Image (cartoon, rainbow, N blue to C red):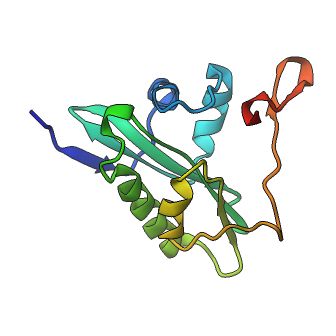
Amino acid sequence: MSEEIELVERFPGVDDYLRLRSAAGMHPKTLQAATRALPNTLYGISLVRGGEPVAMGRIIGDNGCFFTIVDIAVIPELQGRGLGKRIMAALDAWLQRNVPESAYVTLIADGDAKYLYSKFGFVESAPVAVNMEYVMGPNGERNTDHLK
């Protein structure tokens, strides 16, 4: 039996956020970090099945010059069914309505996700610009193990 998957213009709460990230194999976040971060969402959506979020995506930024798409996650059993495209279409529609001229809109594409994002106008910026990152560890330790 397949239940309908509804798009809700609201980002999941902290517990569902942490659950979806984990289920999708994304880098884990602490409860403290997620609790601080989620209220800063400019726009977020959930895909909900039977009252439970099964996918998500959100936009963060300064609401003027910089907008970043983050936290696109779909539970494994529903991956490959167009839900990522559905999430991106909703996020893109919001961006088209709300982002001022000259603002940067960015995201980090993991693996083959770049093919989906290219359908929404994103292009690779290297070699002009490259993404650089580290994950903050305990006591301010900079960790890049996730990139190995």
**Is residue 1 found left or right of 142 in the rendered image?**
left
Extreme-top residue of the structure? 138
Query: Residue 144: horizontal and vertical position, in percent?
Result: 82, 32
Residue at 34% of width from left, 50% of height from top?
A: 83
Residue at 41% of width from left, 52% of height from top?
A: 84
Query: Residue 59: horizontal and vertical position, in percent?
Result: 57, 54
Query: Residue 127: horizontal and vertical position, in percent?
Result: 82, 68
Task: Tell me: residue 102, above or below residue 137.
Answer: below
**Is residue 125 found left or right of 129 in the rendered image?**
left
As rendered, which of 43 and 127 lies closer to the eye? Answer: 127
**Is residue 126 found left or right of 13 in the rendered image?**
right
- Indicate the quadrant containing the C terminus: top left, top right, bottom left or bottom right: top right
Extreme-bottom residue of the structure? 101
As rendered, which of 139 and 131 lies closer to the eye? Answer: 131
Residue at 48% of width from left, 48% of height from top?
A: 57
Task: Tell me: residue 84, above or below residue 4.
Answer: below
Residue at 84% of width from left, 18% of height from top?
A: 138
As rendered, which of 70 and 10 lies closer to the eye? Answer: 70
Extreme-left residue of the structure? 1
Query: Residue 64: horizontal and vertical position, in percent?
Result: 69, 68
Total number of numbered discs in the rendering: 0
- Indicate the quadrant containing the N terminus: top left, top right, bottom left or bottom right: top left
Q: Give the quarter of the image for residue 99.
A: bottom right
